[in-house]
Each structure stands twice: as structure tokens, then as C-alpha cells.
Image (spheres, grey):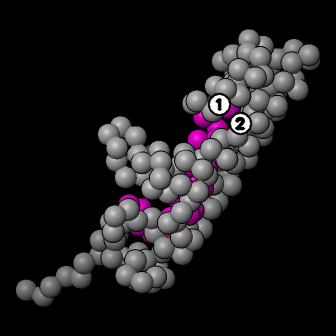
Amino acid sequence: PPRRPDLSPRLLSRRRGQAVGSMVVDMASTAWILVCMALVQLMTPGLAFFYGGLVSSTSVITMMMQSFVAMGIISILWYVVGFSFCFGSSLGFFGNPGTYAGMRGLNAAEPLTRDGEVLVDGIPGLLFAGYQGMFAVITPALMTGAFADRFRFRPYILFLSMW
């Protein structure tokens, strides 16, 4: 009998995608993740306005400031060590903070690899780190609604750093 062509998604992405070395970056997947990342990033200011509308008029600025400060602090922590804690070489439960410290070893043109193994195929590693970082930003911002008008600002910053 004639042999049927292999139409697995992995091979289809290799046919559609742009070859980078031996890896493949799929342009459609990259564009879709960029759109999704932008939408998640817009959720944090939207959440700030939503929570600002739920509290008394004396607490609006505080609630909004908590969400915007979360964007700044978590983005910096994610860049420095957060991504490595989540996706670095395993040290038990956490990843090695030095694996991708400062986004070292991530490329905007190649998929994410660790120890020669492709972790995320089809999108650039730097884009994957940014996409995951957006969820790291919005998670503590979501929690601010639970303790509206109950947290002072300095303990909140400490909480963000430890979270």
C-alpha cells in the first residue's frame, strides 16, 4: 500500500515556519503569542481601574497604584531571576536562578532550549519569557482585590517581592 504523508502538527509547523539552525520558529504562532501577550498586559491597567471603582473615593489612587507598582516590580524581578526560578535547570522544586539570569541565553530568533533540549517549540524563547512574565505580573495584581483597604503600601511591596 502507498505510504501516507506524516501530517503531525510538529512537521506541519516545520513546513510553514522559518528555519533557524535546526530549530523552527512558526511565524503564525509567534504573531498569536504577541497578540495574547499584549492583551494580558492590558489586563493589569484594566484591573487597576476595575478595583479603583470598587473602593471608596479615598482609596482609588492606592488601589490603582498597587496594580501599576506590581507591573514595575514584578517585571524587574522576572527579568533578573523570576524566569530562571520557573524554567531554569531543576534544583528540586525551583529552577536554578542562574540559568537564565537577566534573560541570558534567551534568543529572539530561536525557541527556548535548556541543556540542548527544546522546551517550547514554535515561538522564540524571549517571547515565551515575556508571555509568562505577563502572567507573573497580573497574579499579585489580582490578589490586591482581596485585601483592598487592608494593606499598607510598604508591606505590599515586600509581599510582591516575596511572592
Which quadrant: the N terminus? bottom left
Magenta stretch containing residue 121, yes or no?
yes
The residue most toward the left is 1
The residue most toward the right is 57
Which residue lies at the image location 29% right of the left edge and 71% below the top edge?
8
The residue most toward the bottom is 2
Say whether residue 118 is left or right of residue 68.
left
Range shown magenta? 119-141
Q: Which residue is mark 2?
A: 70
Residue 144 position in % (x across, y down):
69, 24
Of the pair 124 and 85, the residue shown nearer to us: 85
Residue 72 position in % (x across, y down):
74, 43
Q: Amino acid at mark 1?
A: Leu
Can residue 87 be seen here? The reply is no
Of the pair 31 and 72, the residue shown nearer to us: 72
Which quadrant: the C terminus? top right
Residue 156: quarter of image: top right
Of the pair 80 and 65, the residue shown nearer to us: 80
Give the CA distance from mark 2 to mark 1: 7 Å
Q: Amino acid at mark 2?
A: Ala
Residue 139, label in figure? none
Residue count near mark 2 (Cα–Cα under 10 Å), binned few <14, some 14–19, many ≥20 = many
CB-based contact (under 8 Å), mark 2 and mark 1: yes
Q: Which residue is mark 1?
A: 160
Of the pair 91 and 53, the residue shown nearer to us: 91
Magenta span main SS: helix
Above or below 141: residue 13 = below
